[in-house]
Amino acid sequence: MQQEIEVKFLDVDFDEVRAKLKKLGAVCEQPMRLMRRVVIDYPDRKLQATGDSWVRVRDEGNRITLTFKKTTEHEFGGAQEIEVNVSDYQKTIDIFLAMGLIVHTDQETKRETWKLGEVEVVLDEWPWIPPFIEIEGLSHDKVKSTAEALGYHWNDAVFGSAVVAYEHHYPGAKDAGIKISKEPEIKFHLPVPDWLKKGKS
């Protein structure tokens, strides 16, 4: 599996990030667009329960991807994935449903993708939390240097999936990370779930 070398910084201002990226000579490869995804697992959530893994089908606007992701550690470089492009969002999901797996959560997000040399910087927006960015590259040094060039302090970095952002913004929600991954729908038009709202800091 390919190792993901990436880091997130939370609570960002997109306009400020864009201005810094332009000043550094970055190129916007994909403007902000709505993305949809589903997380697929066995009915008993065996992949997540036994290996902190999951299958994701994602419509990224310009392509559709099928990904197997596995989190080994919630730290820099602690995630691995296998990813391929597929041609049809719903039919790919239907294949897994026919095999007896189920959709555990249906999500939508917004994303803008920038390229700075060999490093990718994405501006992410998820329902119910402030926006954040993700910096991904081929090496630890390039990711760190890009974060520094954008004015971010490494002590403020977080690692892992978007779950960590929900845990950060709703620290009082018991088992927020576990529950958000089980939320049937995470979509912009839906209200904040009561269990999550109670955990607001």
Image (tube, rainbow, N blue to C red):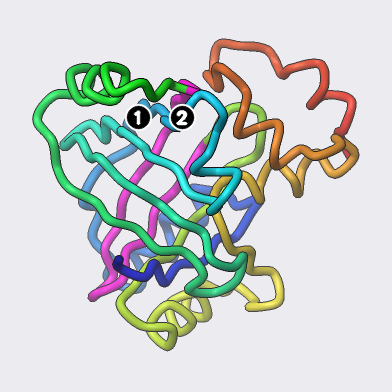
Residue designated by label 2: 42
At horizontal 74% and vertical 45% (from top left) the residue drawn is 167
Mark 1 or mark 2, earlier in chain: 1
| Amino acid type at image mark 1 | Met
CA separation, marks 1 and 2? Answer: 24 Å
What residue range appears in magenta? 104-125
Residue 16's label in the rendered image is: none
At horizontal 38% and vertical 39% (from top left) the residue drawn is 55
Classified by dominant secondary structure, the portion drawn in magenta counts as strand
Callout 1: 10 Å neighbours few (<14), some, many (20+)? some
> Is residue 30 toward the left or the right of residue 124 in the image?
left
Q: Residue furthest bottom?
A: 141
At horizontal 58% and vertical 27% (from top left) the residue drawn is 127
Q: Position of residue 42 (x, y in %)?
A: 46, 29
The quadrant the N terminus occupies is bottom left
Q: Position of residue 169 (x, y in %)?
A: 77, 43
Q: Quadrant of residue 45?
A: top right
Element on which disc 2 rests: loop
The quadrant the C terminus occupies is top right
Q: Position of residue 31 (x, y in %)?
A: 28, 40
Element on which disc 1 rests: strand
Above or below 164: residue 193: above
Q: Is residue 51 magenta?
A: no
Mark nearest the camera among 1 and 2 is: 2
At horizontal 65% and vertical 76% (from top left) the residue drawn is 153
Q: Quadrant of residue 135?
A: bottom left
